[in-house]
Image: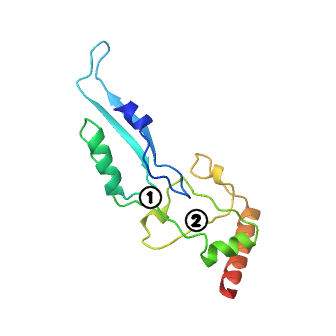
Amino acid sequence: VMEWFKNYKFDKISDVLGPVKMTVTQINAGKQHNVVPSECDLVVDIRVTDRYTNAEILEVVKANVNAEVTPRSMHLNASSIPIEHGLVQAGIALGRTTYGSPTLSDQSVLSCQSLKLGPGETLRSHSADEFIFVNEIEEGVDLYIKILTDFFKL
């Protein structure tokens, strides 16, 4: 089962977010040394893209894994915004680049087009010692004002 999660490749690949990613993040088995466990529980982190719904991913997993499958959540979805959207174009005009974020945020519960833009270094976010410098916040506020000003000129 773990090999399947490691090796399976979904057919459809998102232009923005890349392929669906599945990673076994927790394994719990056995109660005693030198005894073969009677069961093994796995937690699998599945990063769904805009090319699949959660239901479609669940269907594929259930069809291919010989195990009981219980999703922890079905409401966290991938989201995107077309590159042609005015907000994206305003950011590009200011020298910003676009990318698909592999991290989860409140954006996953939105049912509308959205983009993720924030100050600071993304590698510092979601870490034990996450922090942001005051000057990064000031630069972020300035960037938001410029993007919105350019967006409303379009």
What amino acid type should be assigned to the residue bearing mark 2?
A: Lys
- The residues tagged by marks 1 and 2 sit, at their Cα atoms, a distance apart of 18 Å
154 lies left or right of 77: right
Using the image as rendered, state which of residue 148 and residue 84 is in the foreground.
84
Image: 71 above or below 136: above
Given this view, does label 1 or label 2 mark the residue nearer the observer? Answer: 1
Q: Residue placed farthest to the top in the image?
A: 34
Give the total number of marks visible in the rendering.
2
Residue named by callout 2: 116
- Label 2: few (<14), some or many (≥20) within 10 Å? some
Determine contact: label 1, label 2, CB under 8 Å. no
**Residue 93 visible, this angle:** yes
Quick one: SS at disc 1? loop
**Residue 25 visible, this angle:** no
Identify which residue is drawn at 53% across, 70% down: 114
Residue 117 rendering spot, x and y as whole percentages: 62, 66
Identify which residue is drawn at 61% across, 74% down: 84
Residue 115 rendering spot, x and y as whole percentages: 56, 68
100 lies left or right of 95: left
Label whose residue precedes the other's in the sequence (1 or 2): 1
| Residue 65, picture quadrant | top left
Residue named by callout 1: 51
Image: 11 above or below 92: above
